[in-house]
Amino acid sequence: MIKQELEHILDTDMRTVSVDKLYEAVLEIAQNRIAKVPAVTGERSVYYMSAEFLIGKLLSNNLMNLGIYDEVRDVLAANGRDISEVEDYEPEPSLGNGGLGRLAACFMDSIATLGLNGQGLGLVYHYGLFRQVFRNRLQAEEKDTWLDKPGWLRKTDFTVPVQIGDVAVTGRMYEIDVLGYNGEKAPLRLFDLESIDDSIITEGIRFDERAVDKNLTLFLYPDDSTEEGLRLRFAQQYFMVSGGLAWILEEHKDHLDRLDSYATIQINDTHPSMVIVLLLKALLADGIAFDRAVEIISNTCAYTNHTILAEALEKWPLAYFEAVDASLVPLLHQLQDLAAARSNDARTAVIDHEGRVHMASLAIHFSKSTNGVAALHTEILKNSELKPFFDMYPDRFNNKTNGITFRRWLQHTNRPLTEFIETRIGDGFKQDAMELLKLERFVDDEASLQELLTIKHTKKEDLAAYIEKTEGISVNADAIFDIQIKRLHEYKRQQMNLLYAIHMYHEIKAGYVPTRPLTMFFGSKAAPAYTIAKDIIHALLTLSKVIADDELVSQYLQIVFVENYNVSKAEMLIPACDISEQISLASKEASGTGNMKFMLNGALTLGTMDGANVEISELVGDENIYIFGESSDTIIEHYAKADYVSRDYYEKSPQIKQAVDFINGPLMLASGTKENLDRLHHELISKDWFMTLIDLEAYIATKNTMIADYEDRMTWAKKTLINIARAGFFSSDRTIAEYNRDIWKV
Ligand code: 26Q
């Protein structure tokens, strides 16, 4: 049937047709089938509102979930075509920054798979985040033209007028079906600006930030460094929430006065939190009394917090509200009065004395639930960051440890490992991830352990071939693959990993050559205005060259920084990993989800007691993970006392000093840029806000232990097997079942 369908759509020889035509034909085959999949219905529904949905490519995943992947692959192969041609050709939707957006995508997959009556609401960004290119070993940003090719977005008839100050625009809703594993689907509904005008982009990702009628959905706006940038981000949020809310009200127009009996709006971080005040305005306009309107909102909305970094907690000046929709200002004052009547603690105010609206305060006061995304994170929220709120609303606080979809991060990315599991424990783990525990029966089975090592090696060879093809760099699959892939941020401490590489460089120069080469992979985008983050990228790219140019050191050490890290690249890197770098400063990483993907694919974690690493370590036990560094309590105390002095660590350890001083030493300056390297060097010694140096020595020691342990291949394989077997807890099906049980009740 598939063969006939393809021939019919193509109406030409499959052997010679161009890849774009072939891609469109396979896309059509999948779309026709997905159209026939019934939509889930029900009395109650959940709206997952998020500024980001980092869904990744969909074609193979959808074919897999439709149960026709192998058939399509075989038909193509019988006609001399490789399905990877089509897979490579598919553009990757560029609709997120990192963890928060990827989490929303995993959640959509699990909502569909569990058959819950839920949908995602967000925005289409024409040029996405940005495409990262390296020029002179520095990050530059280009627009990502992912929408140029045909894809999954379907235009709908639903439009909504939105008034932004004195500018009137129209939003239109688009849809993408997210297919679950059980033959059900969940809609992702994304709003776009009808009057978008990409001719205002001048160069790279630069454009007139004031022309909201033309620019609102051009980019996932990354620049919060200027007043104009912030105002645009605010307008974007307003537009997103206006569209999403109009759709919710449309679906519930018959019973707005009982909306709380029918709907939950899950607010993904504070980005969509102005839905609270917009909903208030809508309910009042519908004739509902103020007190009842507030009650409806507080029983309908739920808030997820993804960060404790003060700078990421949004505070929008009242003036921004005034400029976009002045009618919201008196409503915000009324909500502030309510909050003030409940507590006179200034830390819980909705509007502070500078006239800024604290969006997290708004979301916590006027919702039924506030959750953190990992056990430690939720405890920190309750005991320190959001303590005054927890004291007011102890029953509203809850934890929902993040999860990942095993469809994408195991079945799709790692077929050999999936088959390894299937042949040993059957395929029940695809429905109930906890069944992976059965794998532990094989913990002493040498043949199984040997096979696991072989699978890992195969995936490393695949990655090596991919890197050769895409980056033109050759890597040795027999080296240890040590991988750190995540957004660039000082708290994630890529700079500490950089210092490890410099340390190893010196060791090799001093004659201490390792048993086996180490290849360090990085993949990371820096926010365009985040200067130090860009300096760290520059230092890593420069060091990569210094090492590659050194005849001795390059035999033992290599740094590969992949350009434009995205979901597709993650899918290649993660299955090939031996050492998973999860080295954030304790207390700063809310959860992390890459850590879970690596664990599931049989990498061992090198990490601090932070975020979900804590839960990973509890699950696998001390002997199956490599933990180092100061505890979150100690770190929080250092911040409270303001007593961390990086220079002290630098002065007292010759090893640290040597590594730090290498950053802007003569060898680095020969290939690197003085301004960037000097600035990074200075930052590390004089400020180091995220305490790189506090953990550096422990990090070096633990990583060295890990590298030594790697040589006992059987023991290592045993550890990886236990990691895989105990990863079931991190299925997003479990996370979503908990959200539904405790909050959504759909
Ligand atoms: C806010 C205001 C202005 C401009 C930008 C932003 C902004 C944009 C994106 C703030 C935060 C984000 C993204 C945050 C994020 O990805 N957080 C991650 O969420 C994951 C899922 O819960 C966690 O696993 C990670 O630990 C957390 O860092």
Image: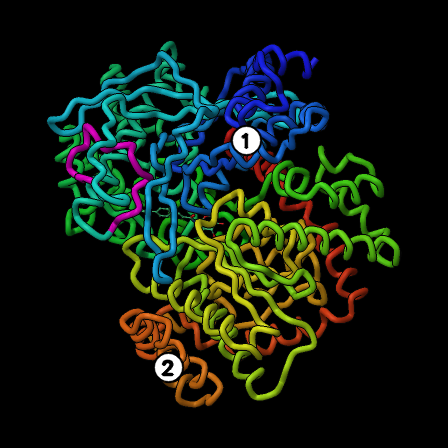
Residue bearing mark 1: 58
The colour scheme is: rainbow
- Around disc 2, counting alpha carbons within 10 Å, would you say few (fewer than 14), some (14 to 19), or many (20 or more)? some
Q: Specify the quadrant of the image occupied by residue 229.
A: top left
Do the residues under discs 2 and 1 have CB atoms within 8 angstroms?
no
Beta carbon of the mark 2 residue lies under 8 A of ligand 1? no
Work out whether mark 2 precedes mark 1 in sequence or the reverse, and give the earlier one: 1
Residues rendered magenta in the picture:
207-224
Name the amino acid type tagged 2: Gly
Q: Nearer the viewer, residue 582 or 154?
A: 154
Name the amino acid type tagged 1: Leu
Marks 2, 1: nearer the viewer: 2
User: Which residue appears at 57% of the width and 29% of the height?
Assistant: 59
Q: Is residue 219 magenta?
A: yes
User: Residue 567: x percent and y percent?
Assistant: 51, 43
Question: Quick check: 370 above or below 453?
Answer: above
User: Residue 318: x percent and y percent?
Assistant: 16, 41
Question: Quick check: 424 above or below 241?
Answer: below
User: Residue 699: x percent and y percent?
Assistant: 55, 74
342 left or right of 716 in image: left
User: Residue 533: x percent and y percent?
Assistant: 36, 61
Q: Nearer the viewer, residue 304 or 681?
A: 681
Q: Secondary structure at mark 1?
A: loop
733 left or right of 301 in image: right
Q: Is residue 736 magenta?
A: no
The C terminus, quarter of image: top right
How far apart marks 2 and 1 lie (CA) works out to 46 Å
Residue bearing mark 2: 665
User: Which residue appears at 75% of the width and 64% of the height?
Assistant: 716
